[in-house]
Image (cartoon, helix red, strand yellow):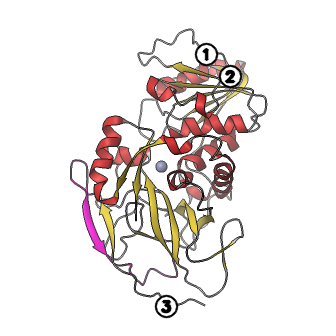
Amino acid sequence: MYKEMPNFPPGKAIVFEGTGKPFRMVEGNIYPDQGPSIIVRNRYTTLCGSDIHTFCGHRKEPDEVVLGHEIAGDILWLPQEEVVTDLRGEPVAVGDRITWSIFAVPPGIEAPREDMPQKSGQLFKYGHALATSNDLFNGGLADYCVLRPNTAFLKISPEIPLKVAATISCAHATVTGALRIAGDITSKNVLVFGAGLLGISCVAMCREAGAKWVGLIDSDESRLGWGAKFGADEIYAFAQNGNNDGFPWPDADIVFDMTGHPEAMKAGIESLALGGSAIWIGAVFPAAAVPVDAQRIVRRVLGIKGLHNYNYDDFLNATIFIENNYRKYPFEELVEKEFTLDEVDNAFRYATESKPVRVGVTIS
Ligand SMILES: [Zn+2]
């Protein structure tokens, strides 16, 4: 039985209207006819790399969009009298802190594969949808978020710092998926290309999964400084001019690419030990094709796998990873600067110019 939704105070949403235009602050109400939805009070949003790409015009989103899909918030309202449970089966109540999946499969739509709900047709994605007066609260840079039906959500401890909790639903969940498709990491030598949040998280996850040795590679030497704090055995500078002949790093059983850059992916394949696997998750923007030496793939028995976003198991396992490790590794430090919702223009400018691992937006 669904309850009638009360009137909530109007809330702010920060609308992106295109590259070069200032963000527009819109005040609006939660539209009551969006169906029986969980209403969340957003508390914190981190700006993901794809938000920055949209801001810079490298990605196309709807003409008016409330960006932000790495969000943590508190349940403000539950639509039914009956007990509501999260993805883990735990009951939730108003006031509970939650994290939720970046996507929701619309009711009536069947996933193309059970293990790939994120590839369903007509998929809804938070922070990527058209913002209208009837549907304003569908991204992270706003006071509220109206959760669509079929959104996977998880209750999390309020002790997890908000700036860490926010990053679960994109970065860490995607990396968890990458480790899933990589298979058993135990006693493997691993190379991670890209020292952004995905690469840094990947280093820590491989370390926790029992990797024998983990190397981290990036062309930005300042980012490599995070490697040791997150469990990397060695860090290496990647020469962007393509002159990486005779790599300074050893061959690896598993190579993760978080960069999406063809030269890095090519170097990754060339760094694979016999029977090794390359796992690609960074290539989510148009780029030149990666030259692949087919004979090398065959004779060295190599594999290449890609993954876009993540599934429900990945989301749950990422949350468990953060619950178990947020005190062990300094994930909080990776959100290098914080802004308020009123300072979103500055937040994006800082993210673009200073290239920190993450910028955070506090929502009070
Ligand atoms: Zn993201």
Q: Nearer the viewer, mark 2 or mark 1?
A: 1
Residues in magenta?
A: 16-37
Residue 301 in percent (x, y) is at 73, 24
Q: Amino acid at mark 1?
A: Trp
> Residue at the spot x=50%, y=13% of the render?
244
Helix, strand or loop at label 3? It is loop
Question: Residue at label 2?
Answer: 252
Mark 2 and mark 1 residues within 8 Å of each other at the beta carbon: yes
Residue 326 in percent (x, y) is at 62, 47
Residue 79 in percent (x, y) is at 55, 83
Question: Residue at label 3?
Answer: 4
Few, some or many residues within 10 Å of mark 3 (<14, 14–19, 20+) = few
Question: Residue at label 1?
Answer: 249
User: As drawn, is 268 to the left or to the right of 139?
Assistant: right
User: As drawn, is 94 to the left or to the right of 85?
Assistant: left
Residue 97 in percent (x, y) is at 57, 66
Q: Amino acid at mark 2?
A: Ala
Against 73, residue 82 (above or below) is below
First in sequence: mark 2 vs mark 3? 3
The C terminus sits in image quarter: bottom left
Q: Is residue 51 visible?
A: yes
